[in-house]
Image (cartoon, helix red, strand yellow):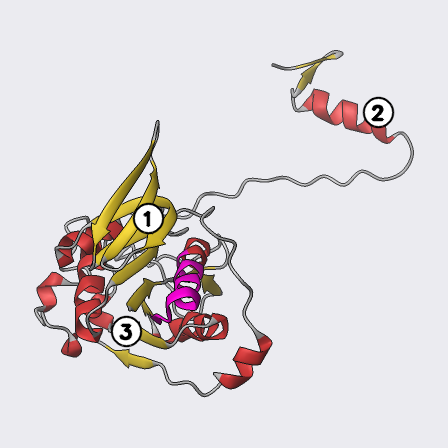
């Protein structure tokens, strides 16, 4: 059984820079980590591997520094890893990102099961996983909290808004998992030593089945960012020292009209 897990490197902080011209997040050189929701997808794949002997391949779209999340996946037990890196892929919206990943997955090989986290912390659309499946023309289920592997498919339990739905899907298929499906394991120190020199394959648009640049990146994105700007920081800090701090604080709050007399404003 062949499993592919989509993972992503996301900013490790909310203090990120945005290109003022293109509106694209500047990822290169910024502190980053694996998308937390993808850890649940990876753990699901590794549990299936332990039960069935499946092969787990992970892949991510991003700059060369995204190799870090592939190495982390190796330290958890993944077998193969790919980084899909090409400047022509940059600035993609949900549609272009999902199409890129579908083409990347096709270029890597044939997979029985594709697993994704339900969303990313830097996008929160929860649309990329299902959109990949649509591009690939395979069945898919989202918000899955339980999965059971059968001989020719999977049984998935979906957490819908007002109900729990159980579906059967034949291979190949795609599943996006909820964060309560399993508790992700920590990277293994023993595995870290064993996979220190494990290769990571990096390739770009030239390896895709569809090499038309207009289908990728900014040019392939129907959603265009008109303007992006960081929120203004207007926090004030006051340090009170000495005796009578309560009285000083009261006077300051009264002066700023946070309170009126002995009552706190609404």
Q: Earlier in the sequence, mark 2 or mark 3?
A: 3
Estimate the spatial distance between the alpha carbons at disc 2 and disc 3, rounded to whole Å.
60 Å
| Left or right of residue 242: residue 141 | left
Specify whether residue 231 is in view: yes
Estimate the spatial distance between the alpha carbons at disc 1 and disc 2, rounded to whole Å.
43 Å
Q: Residues within 10 Å of mark 2 (few under 14, many from 20)?
A: few
User: What residue sits right under mark 3 in the picture?
Assistant: 85
Residue 253 vs 70, above or below: the answer is above
Q: Overall secondary structure of the magenta stretch?
A: helix
Would residue 53 be counted in the magenta stretch?
Answer: yes
Percent across and percent down for residue 61 are 30, 67
Which residue sits furthest front?
Answer: 151
Q: Quadrant of residue 45?
A: bottom left
Disc 1 is placed on an element classified as: loop
Which residue sits furthest right?
Answer: 243
Estimate the spatial distance between the alpha carbons at disc 3 and disc 1, rounded to whole Å.
24 Å
Q: Earlier in the sequence, mark 3 or mark 1?
A: 3
Image quarter in which the C terminus is found: top right
User: What residue sits right under mark 2 in the picture?
Assistant: 247
> Viewer-proximal residue, 147 or 259?
147
Q: Earlier in the sequence, mark 1 or mark 2?
A: 1
Q: Nearer the viewer, mark 1 or mark 2?
A: 1
Residue 31 vs 180, above or below: the answer is below
Residues in magenta, as a range: 41-56
Q: Quadrant of residue 106?
A: bottom left
User: What residue sits right under mark 1 in the picture?
Assistant: 228
């Amino acid at each position: 059984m062949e499993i592919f897990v989509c993972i992503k490197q996301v900013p490790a902080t909310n203090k990120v820079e945005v290109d003022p011209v293109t509106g694209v997040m500047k990822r290169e050189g910024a502190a980053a980590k694996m998308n937390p929701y993808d850890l649940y997808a990876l753990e699901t794949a590794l549990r299936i591997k332990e039960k069935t002997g499946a092969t787990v391949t992970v892949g991510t779209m991003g700059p060369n520094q995204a190799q870090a999340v592939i190495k982390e996946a190796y330290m958890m037990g993944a077998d193969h890893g790919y980084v899909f890196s090409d400047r022509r892929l940059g600035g993609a919206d949900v549609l272009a990102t999902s199409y890129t990943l579908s083409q990347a997955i096709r270029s890597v090989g044939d997979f029985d099961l594709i697993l994704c986290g339900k969303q990313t912390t830097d996008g929160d659309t929860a649309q990329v996983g299902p959109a990949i499946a649509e591009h690939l023309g395979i069945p898919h289920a989202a918000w899955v909290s339980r999965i059971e592997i059968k001989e020719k498919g999977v049984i998935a339990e979906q957490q819908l808004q007002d109900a729990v739905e159980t579906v059967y899907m034949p291979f190949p298929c795609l599943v996006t998992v909820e964060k309560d499906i399993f508790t992700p394991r920590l990277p293994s120190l023993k595995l870290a030593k064993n996979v220190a020199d494990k290769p990571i394959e990096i390739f770009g648009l030239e390896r895709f089945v569809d090499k038309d640049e207009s289908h990728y990146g900014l040019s392939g994105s129907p959603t265009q960012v008109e303007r992006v700007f960081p929120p203004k920081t207007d926090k004030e800090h006051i340090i009170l020292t000495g005796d009578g701090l309560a009285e000083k604080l009261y006077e300051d709050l009264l002066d700023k009209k946070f309170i009126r007399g002995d009552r706190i404003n609404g």
